Image (cartoon, rainbow, N blue to C red):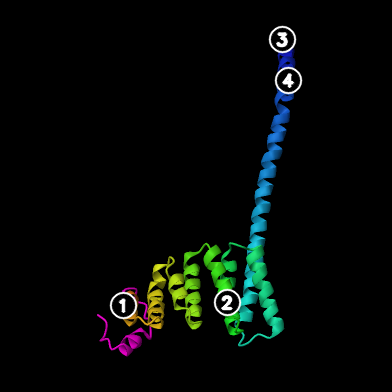
């Protein structure tokens, strides 16, 4: 009988414990399961978004590789750029899309649209190297538009070290356009020094120095 009472007491104790704690245990298990499934769903969503962005960028890349785009292809490219920048903003593909958009705009003779795309990347991008490329390309467009002062202002922003020689080269072009050959000489000499230090040849700079009557830069 003592054993029976002990078993009954244990059963009653178990019932009381379950009554007091069972609901919280079930809730905890449900929450944990929901967390696991939610995290998996989020990962799947992110993977799907990345795949969609990759496919759209590849389509844009294919279009940009054509020698010339007709009106329908140009509209398709613009739609892809809009989708990438709005639906996948902040991604690498969105930044690359803006660079391609600027290039296509230049090919179409729309330099205003090209400048807008590059300025957007410079302002909103999160990747210093791509922002640096955008600064270089925008400065070249500004020089082509005979706005050398704007080009120098654009180049005054931060620039990754691998692009420093190119920046110095374009600065030299801008200074020469402003009628300051001495500043141009200094910038081009810096461009040569930086390109040699990084073992990245920069063609045409020595010819510019030769045109100024400068000996081989030391």
State the separation of the CA atoms marked 2 and 3: 92 Å
Q: Which residues are magenta?
A: 197-218
Q: Earlier in the sequence, mark 4 or mark 1?
A: 4
State the residue position of label 1: 186
In the rendering, which numbered label is found on residue 2?
Answer: 3
Mark 4, mark 1: which one is toward the viewer?
Answer: 1
Badge 3 marks a residue whose secondary structure is helix
Mark 4, mark 2: which one is toward the viewer?
Answer: 2
State the separation of the CA atoms marked 4 and 2: 74 Å
Measured as percent of width and height from the top left, residue 39 is found at 65, 49
Main SS, magenta region, reads: loop
In the rendering, which numbered label is found on residue 114?
Answer: 2
Q: Earlier in the sequence, mark 1 or mark 3?
A: 3
State the separation of the CA atoms marked 1 and 3: 103 Å
Crowd rating for badge 2 (residues with CA inside 10 Å; few <14, some 14–19, many 20+): many
Marks 2 and 3: CB-CB under 8 Å? no
Nearest the viewer among 165 and 197 is: 165
Residue drawn at (60%, 81%) of the image: 110
The quadrant of the picture occupied by the C terminus is bottom left
């Amino acid at each position: 009988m003592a054993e029976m009472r002990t078993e009954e007491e244990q059963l009653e104790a178990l019932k009381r414990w379950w009554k007091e704690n069972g609901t919280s245990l079930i809730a905890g298990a449900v929450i944990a399961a929901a967390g696991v499934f939610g995290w998996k769903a989020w990962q799947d969503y992110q993977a799907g978004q990345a795949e969609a962005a990759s496919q759209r960028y590849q389509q844009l890349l294919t279009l940009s590789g054509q020698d010339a785009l007709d009106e329908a292809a140009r509209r398709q490219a613009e739609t892809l750029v809009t989708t990438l920048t709005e639906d996948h903003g902040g991604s690498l593909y969105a930044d690359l899309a803006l660079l391609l958009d600027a290039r296509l705009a230049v090919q179409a003779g729309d330099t205003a649209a090209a400048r807008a795309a590059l300025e957007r990347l410079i302002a909103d991008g999160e990747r210093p190297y791509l922002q640096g490329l955008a600064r270089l390309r925008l400065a070249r467009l500004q020089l082509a538009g005979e706005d050398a002062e704007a080009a120098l202002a654009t180049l005054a922003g931060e620039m990754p070290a691998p692009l420093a020689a190119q920046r110095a080269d374009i600065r030299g072009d801008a200074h020469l356009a402003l009628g300051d050959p001495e500043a141009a000489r200094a910038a081009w000499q810096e461009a040569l020094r930086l390109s040699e230090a990084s073992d990245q040849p920069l063609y045409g700079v020595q010819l510019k120095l030769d045109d100024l009557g400068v000996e081989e830069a030391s």
